[in-house]
Image: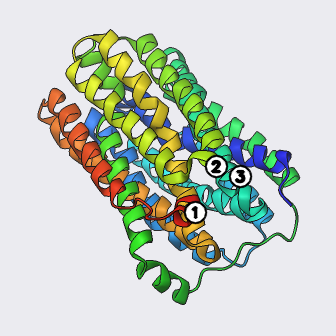
Amino acid sequence: MSNPFMLTALLIGNFIIGTSVVAPAGILNELSDGLDVTIREASYLIAFGSAVLCIGSPLMSWLTGRLDRRLAMAGAMLIIAVCHIVSAFVSTFVALFAMRMVMLLAAAFFTPQAASIAGIAAAPEKRAGAIAFVFIGWSFAIALGVPIATALASRFGWPAAYLAIGFAAAVSFLLLATALPSHFKTPPVDLQAWASLFRSRDILLLLLITAIVACAQYMILTFIAPLLVLLGNSDADGISIAIGLFGITGIIGSVTAARIVGPVGPFTTSLIFAGAIAIGMCIWSAGAQIYAAMLTGVLIWGIGFSAINSLQQARLVLAAPALSAGAVALNTSVLYIGQAIGSLIGGVLFDRGHYLSIGYLATAVMVASLGVLLMTRPHNADVSAGV
């Protein structure tokens, strides 16, 4: 049932979702100036948005479980398009915040369902690769979407960035409405399925890894633009270059992960790309106040940024194929819990002027995630082939 057009449409949809979720991190300075709020207050768009995504992911998966996937996925993207276009015309932070929360409810539904659809539609031996493929959209979001939004905001104001995302989402809506088959449904997730997931040690460990990795990354990523200015003496173009290169190496990492996950195995592949994140964040922290060193850290970190999430999704689908929709929704939920915690911790440190400490603490948390990842190491060849 899987076809390249459908997978590509899901990839583009994830590009829109990734850009929508991360874009405020690249334009915090413009949002702060344009809406007359502090950097920390502007960061609430990410921190509190992550909380909405956390709650919304399993909730929306449950509420829409019996809907046709084409209708649900295209409808979610249409809501995202409308919310961004309307947001471009609001004049207060409160109004922008409210529109973003509505938009993120739709975004919360999309990403886990994209993974579930890709996993169900693909042949069993190609599931991990199909899921990794659709998550390349997140890498493109960092490589293209967020830098373009940053460039537009720095030159024409933050509303221009929101308009661009809104119109791109409208195009994605049309692609999804065309590419997804009608009357296609994923298995609904009932209360018994949720209970089964929470009783599984393997599932819970995988979810914990996702939360810790997200927490570590978003301590820095939420404030990457102002940190590059304050520590790296960068300007708007330097920020766009750093985020763009971060995304380019993310694409390389995601494509590589999709290619090697079959022969190498999901666990080993996950260890490789999580290690890249830890090394990159360590270089960022040690090289703070030198733009070139921070950029080097960003390049290495980016290799694992999107790949590790797609690998986590793939491991969950392989660990519980019959409960894949629920497992992926929970993974998305804890991902955003991690993002919210990381953003809030980073916000406290940023507000107190502890700019260097953000990187060092984030690196320590990332190293801790590697310890948890090692706890999921398979003990025999049959399990290794699966998770």
Q: Nearer the viewer, residue 252 or 67?
A: 252
Which type of secondary structure does the marked residue at label 1 adopt? helix
Q: Earlier in the sequence, mark 3 or mark 2?
A: 3
Which type of secondary structure does the marked residue at label 2 adopt? helix
User: In the rendered image, is residue 222 in sight?
Assistant: no
Contact (CB < 8 A) between labels 3 and 1?
Answer: no
Q: Is residue 232 left or right of residue 361?
A: right
The residue that appears at 47% across and 58% down in the rendered structure is 53
Q: Nearer the viewer, residue 267 or 167?
A: 267
Amino acid of disc 2? Gly
**What mark, if any, has residue 262 been given in the picture?**
2
Q: Dot 1 corresponds to which residue?
A: 386
Amino acid of disc 1? Gly
Amino acid of disc 3? Leu
How many other residues sit within 10 Å of disc 1, few (<14), some (14-19) or many (≥20)? some
The residue that appears at 35% across and 40% down in the rendered structure is 217
Question: What's the distance in space between the residues labelled 2 and 1, CA to CA?
Answer: 10 Å
The residue that appears at 43% across and 22% down in the rendered structure is 299
How many other residues sit within 10 Å of disc 2, few (<14), some (14-19) or many (≥20)? some
Question: What's the distance in space between the residues labelled 3 and 2, CA to CA?
Answer: 35 Å
Q: Dot 3 corresponds to which residue?
A: 78
How many other residues sit within 10 Å of disc 3, few (<14), some (14-19) or many (≥20)? many
Question: What's the distance in space between the residues labelled 3 and 1, CA to CA?
Answer: 36 Å
The residue that appears at 39% across and 70% down in the rendered structure is 204
Residue 75 percent coordinates (x, y): 73, 59
Which type of secondary structure does the marked residue at label 3 adopt? helix
Instruction: Please tell me whether mark 3 or mark 1 is closer to you in this view.
Output: 1
